[in-house]
Image (cartoon, rainbow, N blue to C red):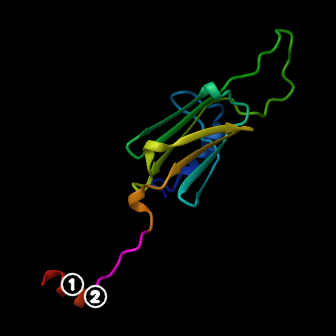
Amino acid sequence: MLMRTDPFRELDRLAQHLAGPGTWSRPSAMPMDAYRDGHEYVIAFDLPGIDPQALDIDVERNMLTVKAERRPLPRSESAQTELSERPQGVFSRQIVLADTLDTERISADYEAGVLTLRIPIAERAKPRKISVRSAGAHKELDG
């Protein structure tokens, strides 16, 4: 259901990780999983330590954009950093969604540092049975 348009996305993500924290003009990527579960498509983003109010989710046509910001924890002025490995800054991911998804009914939940989006499969894209009439039945209807 996801349409991959950039084969070098992983290289970009790795380069951004090495370049430092993301900014609004150059956000870092966020890890995600995507899978189909019955009649819906599920996308899960790892965003630990993000305030739910700092999440921004938009969909325009079939382009889904997820942005989040992780700010440094408040510290006293006397605190000295010994180690800092948790990424901070702005994180963003854009995904081209297939036309078979119902972008009008996307739901979003955030729990235990994971943002989960559920996108229903559009009714027109669900499998359905097509009945076949026999030639004899067709003639009876016409005659």
Q: Quadrant of residue 55?
A: top right
Residue 108 x, y percent position in the rendering? 58, 39
Disc 2 to disc 1: CB gap under 8 Å? yes
Residue 23 x, y percent position in the rendering? 57, 28
Compared to residue 83, the image places residue 108 above or below, namely below
Asked whether residue 91 is in view, the answer is yes
Question: In this view, which residue lies farthest toward the top?
Answer: 77
Mark 1 Cα within 10 Å, few/some/many (few <14, many 20+)? few
Foreground pick, 76 / 56: 56
Q: Amino acid at mark 2?
A: Ser
Compared to residue 28, the image places residue 77 above or below, namely above
Residue 125 x, y percent position in the rendering? 41, 61
Residue that label 1 marks = 138
Q: Please tell me whether the stretch drawn in magenta is mainly helix, strand or loop.
A: loop
Q: Quadrant of residue 19?
A: top right
* Residue numbers of the magenta segment: 128-133
Spatial separation of the CA atoms under disc 2 and disc 1 = 6 Å
Is residue 125 rendered to the left or right of residue 143? right
Which residue is depicted at the point 63% across and 39% down?
109
Residue 131 x, y percent position in the rendering? 35, 78
Q: Secondary structure at mark 1?
A: helix
Residue that label 2 marks = 134
Which residue is depicted at the point 41% across and 73% down?
129
Q: Amino acid at mark 1?
A: His
